[in-house]
Image (cartoon, coloured by chain):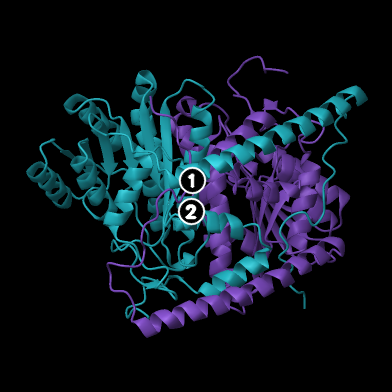
Chain colours: A purple, B cyan
């Protein structure tokens, strides 16, 4: 029987130069020298930016004000979205809350309008439906004005084996978690570009940093959110004068009801997070104009480090930590 | 004006333990000791697996035979798919080629049947359409038998600013590049599980490792491919006896016609790759049961390393390397 050879990359190297006309020898020497120069220059920059990031970790920049901002949040009927709506309203922003569930959403909006002096606006919208997003966006423009910050927060997380997902369920995961952002961008990016001002926030997940059993379509959707925002950020910054920011957030398991059967071995270190805490981190990351933030903060760097290890070592670590989410189809949740 | 603070993660730490009942002190001590023990044990394993991966880089394992395998490849009318079909047929596998373009696909199948003794089968299929995939899969089962290897290769890559993508175009990118794999899995995973034998190959991209301008929906789709296969691999290996493998491939820019206006500063080191070379790497990675492979091999480790740097340093490096794909809407391609 064949042993499994899970070697990451480079087991054989393809000879990239060759075949399609190699550059002239003088051009080759020039390219080698330029690459050497650039590499040295970049290493110096790297040292500087490492220093800067350590400095900024100690002396955190003050979060910018959100007064006067019109903040659209999807999924405000519940969980992280509701907390985001409350916290942004508390910080002085005009909140526009979208949800597919009228009753829950009305409650959030009512709570804001009772507690804070700045008015909040609620709309019913199915973010998976492009026409619905564009129509609702038009209403928001008429009622409230140009949205300056949007947070694509609404999401679903069915959790079971891939073959237990119905086709319709898979399609909904992609439509809600991913296509939502495309339709929101279609609706709001033009006015942000016109005003050269705006901030786009996407909520990915720990499942957008690594793969998990029972969450195949969800992981695909949350990886897609990362790729979408990372390429959008690269595209926006090709225009040096562009003042539209992006922030992608990767929360660990959050106690919102989506995560029904968590299995956490080291709950002293890796306890489920409360939606209030996530909302606070999201708002602070946006107000500090951070590009990427995981909750807790060490998660993304830990994951970047682990990715450098051979795949077999990565799998051993996953097995030793023995944490994840059990199927939501199990009637009696398995308890340790 | 506000400076941009693009600090990655950890600018503020959320105090994860707390609030929701901390474990008893004896339990806390036990968890700390267990985590210390596990960490030490894992570091030893890490050293072993690093050694193993160096050994396997030098003494490459022999690729396993594909004789007797039924290999389904999508997008066999053209580019990498066509080369994969020819190379798998050359290596003795029974090839099943799917394409939406009948004429091109017929040509590939004809070429195989002329050059090799093992028969190849061609089918017209729109992989974005679930019903079409399931129907065609049923025909393959009747005509050829159980597919033992499938390579989800068909893909599209429109290349222009996000707002220049039509809604229909964005939907097609997701449907072809991502949903294809879900429908192929719906069609073929059950028989692979029944026989406890199979191999699933996904073609991601360098655009599945990092974001690029002009490719926002494409990057989202290729990140999704990575997340899908990574979580599927994790799910499959929860069953220790499972003998179904996965391989994800991340090619650099390939000279297939998809990539119309490449912009490559250091073409001595980063030349476009020919589809023949990519096909060879894909087949060898599958036959050596590698989990992840980039083409060229160093790409994925380079990218993993760069991800550890502060985001500003990452962006500086991207700017210095100055490579990517210009818009395909530019009538006269920009040449250096």
Q: Looking at the picture, how far across and down is residue B170, in whole percent?
A: 42, 56
Quarter of the rendering occupied by the N terminus of chain B: bottom right
Q: Image point 53% across, 54% down: which residue?
A: B301
Image vertical order of residue B86 relative to residue B207, above or below: above
Q: Residues within 10 Å of mark 1 (few under 14, many from 20)?
A: many
Q: Looking at the picture, how far across and down is residue B247, in whole percent?
A: 42, 40
Front residue (pair B333, A302): A302
Q: Image point 73% across, 72% down: which residue?
A: A48
Secondary-structure class at tag 2:
helix
Q: CA distance from mark 1 to mark 2?
A: 7 Å
User: The residue marked by circle 1 belongs to what chain?
Assistant: B
Q: Image point 55% across, 70% down: which residue?
A: B318
Image vertical order of residue B136 relative to residue A283, above or below: above
User: From where the camera sits, is residue A181 visible?
Assistant: no
Judge left or right: residue A13 versus residue A90: left
Mark 2 and mark 1 in contact (Cβ < 8 Å)?
yes
Asked where in the image residue A277 lies, by quadrant, the reply is top right
List the residue tagged with mark 1: B226
Judge left or right: residue A183 versus residue A152: left
């Amino acid at each position: 029987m064949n042993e499994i050879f899970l070697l990451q990359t480079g087991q054989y190297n393809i000879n990239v130069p060759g075949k399609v006309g190699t550059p002239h020898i003088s051009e080759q020497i020039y390219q080698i020298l330029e690459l050497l120069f650039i590499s040295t220059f970049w290493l110096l920059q790297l040292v500087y930016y490492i220093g800067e990031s350590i400095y900024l970790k100690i002396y955190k920049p003050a979060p910018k004000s959100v007064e006067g901002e019109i903040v659209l949040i999807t999924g405000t009927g519940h969980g992280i979205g509701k907390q985001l709506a409350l916290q942004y309203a508390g910080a002085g922003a005009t909140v526009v809350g979208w949800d597919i569930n009228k009753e829950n959403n009305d409650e959030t909006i009512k709570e804001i309008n009772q507690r804070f002096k700045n008015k909040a606006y609620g709309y019913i919208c199915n973010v998976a439906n492009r026409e619905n997003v564009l129509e609702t966006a038009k209403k928001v423009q008429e009622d409230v004005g140009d949205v300056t910050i949007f947070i694509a927060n609404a999401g679903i997380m069915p959790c079971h084996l891939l073959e237990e997902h119905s086709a319709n369920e898979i399609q909904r995961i992609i439509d809600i978690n991913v296509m939502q952002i495309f339709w929101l961008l279609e609706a709001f990016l033009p006015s942000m570009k016109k005003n050269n001002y705006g901030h786009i926030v996407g909520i990915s997940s720990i499942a957008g940093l690594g793969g998990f059993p029972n969450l195949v379509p969800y992981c695909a959707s949350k990886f897609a959110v990362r790729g979408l925002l990372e390429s959008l950020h690269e595209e926006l910054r090709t225009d040096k004068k562009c003042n539209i920011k992006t922030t992608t957030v990767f929360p660990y398991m959050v106690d919102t009801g989506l995560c029904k059967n968590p299995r956490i071995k080291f709950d002293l270190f890796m306890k489920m997070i409360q939606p209030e805490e996530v909302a606070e981190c999201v708002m602070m990351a946006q107000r500090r104009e951070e590009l990427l933030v995981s909750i807790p903060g060490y998660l993304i760097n830990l994951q970047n480090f682990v990715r450098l290890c051979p795949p077999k070592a990565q799998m051993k670590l996953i097995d030793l930590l023995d944490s994840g989410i059990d199927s939501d189809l199990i009637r009696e949740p398995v308890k340790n």
